[in-house]
Image: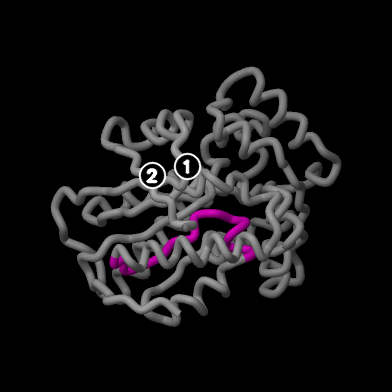
C-alpha cells in the first residue's frame, strides 16, 4: 500500500483518464473551483480502456493512483467511466483512506434518482462500461420503477480522441448509435464516457429537446466542490499552476487539451510503468 504525506486544503486534486476524456472533468472542476491546483494524468499509452480486461485496468489505475499520491494530491478523481466501473474499489483499497477517491458513476446515479421525471434512462458508453452494467445495477438498487437501456458505442471515444467531433463524420456515427432500437423510448440519456461531453451538442441536435442529456463532467465537478466544502479542504490558492501528464506523448492529445485550457497546457510525459 502506498505511503505518502497527505497535503490538506492547498494540495492538488489528482485526475486521471485513459486519454483526453477526463479533461472534460478537469475543465468543469476548474470552472467551479478556480483556486484548486489540478494534476492530470492521461494514460495515452493504454488508450482506450474500454476494450481492456478488468485486471489490466485495475493495474493501470493503481499505478496512476500511486503517481498522484507521490505528488501529494489531496483527492483522486477517476475521470473515466470504465475505470470507475472496474477499478474504483481497488483504488480505494490501495489508497487506504489517506485521501478521498471520487468516481464518475455515483454522482450521476444520485442526480438521476433524485429527478423523479426520469423514468426511462438511456446509457451510452464504451464496451467495458456497458459490459459492467454498473449504471443499471446502481440505478435499480435505488429505484425499482426506473428502466435502464444501455447501448455500447465503441467508436465514439476513439473518434473524439482523434479530434473528430462537430463534423459530418461524427454526426453520421452518433445518429447511427442513437437510432438503435433499445434507445427508442428513453426520456433521458447518460453520456457515460467522459469523452462524450465533447459531442453533447450533436446528441442534443439529434433529440431536438425531447430527451434530457446528462453531462457527467458538470455533475462530477459539483460533487467534488460539495465534498471539499463539507470537509473544509477547499483551497484558497490564487492562480494555481496545473500540471498535465501523459504516459505517451501524442500530438492529437496536445491539440485537444488546448481546446479546454487554451495555451496554458504544457504536456509532460511520465513513464510510470518502469
Q: Nearer the viewer, residue 257 or 248?
A: 248
Do the CB atoms of the residues marked 2 and 1 lie less than 8 Å apart?
yes
**Residue, disc 1:** 248
Q: Nearer the viewer, residue 233 or 46?
A: 46
Q: Where residue 33 sits in the image (x, y, percent)?
A: 28, 54
Q: Is residue 115 visible?
A: no
Q: Quadrant of residue 227?
A: bottom left
Q: Residue at x 37, y 59 (%)?
A: 14
Q: Quadrant of residue 144?
A: bottom right
Element class at badge 2? strand
Q: Where residue 264 sits in the image (x, y, percent)?
A: 26, 36
Q: Where residue 204 sits in the image (x, y, percent)?
A: 60, 34
Element class at badge 1? loop
Residue 26: in magenta span: no
Q: Nearer the viewer, residue 34 or 203?
A: 34
**Residue, disc 2:** 269
Q: Quadrant of residue 173?
A: top right
Q: Residues within 10 Å of mark 1 (few under 14, many from 20)?
A: some
Above or below for 49 versus 108: above
Q: Residue at x 25, y 74 (%)?
A: 232
Pick the quarter of the image with the N terminus. Answer: bottom left
Residue at mark 2 to residue at mark 1: CA–CA distance: 6 Å
Q: Which residues are magenta?
A: 72-86
Q: Nearer the viewer, residue 169 or 18?
A: 18
Amino acid at each position: 500500500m502506498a505511503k505518502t504525506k497527505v497535503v490538506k486544503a492547498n494540495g492538488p486534486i489528482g485526475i486521471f483518464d485513459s486519454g483526453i476524456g477526463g479533461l472534460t472533468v478537469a475543465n468543469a472542476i476548474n470552472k467551479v473551483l478556480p483556486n484548486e491546483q489540478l494534476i492530470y494524468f492521461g494514460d495515452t499509452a493504454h488508450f482506450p480502456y474500454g476494450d481492456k480486461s478488468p485486471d489490466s485496468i485495475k493495474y493501470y489505475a493503481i499505478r496512476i493512483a500511486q503517481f498522484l499520491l507521490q505528488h501529494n494530491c489531496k483527492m483522486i478523481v477517476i475521470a473515466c467511466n470504465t475505470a470507475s466501473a472496474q477499478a474504483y474499489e481497488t483504488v480505494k483499497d490501495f489508497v487506504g483512506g489517506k485521501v478521498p477517491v471520487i468516481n464518475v458513476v455515483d454522482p450521476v446515479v444520485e442526480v438521476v434518482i433524485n429527478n423523479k421525471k426520469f423514468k426511462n434512462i438511456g446509457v451510452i458508453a464504451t464496451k467495458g462500461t456497458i459490459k459492467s452494467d454498473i449504471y443499471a445495477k446502481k440505478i435499480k438498487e435505488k429505484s425499482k420503477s426506473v428502466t435502464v437501456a444501455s447501448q455500447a458505442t465503441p467508436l465514439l471515444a476513439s473518434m473524439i480522441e482523434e479530434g473528430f467531433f462537430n463534423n459530418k463524420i461524427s454526426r453520421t456515427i452518433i445518429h447511427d448509435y442513437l437510432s438503435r432500437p433499445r434507445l427508442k423510448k428513453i426520456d433521458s440519456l447518460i453520456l457515460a464516457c467522459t469523452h462524450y461531453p465533447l459531442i453533447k451538442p450533436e446528441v442534443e441536435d439529434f433529440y431536438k429537446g425531447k430527451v434530457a442529456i446528462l453531462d457527467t463532467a458538470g455533475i462530477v465537478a459539483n460533487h467534488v466542490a460539495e465534498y471539499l466544502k463539507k470537509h473544509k479542504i477547499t483551497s484558497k490558492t490564487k492562480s494555481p499552476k496545473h500540471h498535465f501528464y501523459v504516459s505517451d506523448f501524442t500530438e492529437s492529445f496536445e491539440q485537444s487539451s488546448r481546446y479546454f485550457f487554451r495555451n496554458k497546457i504544457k504536456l509532460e510525459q511520465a513513464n510510470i510503468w518502469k
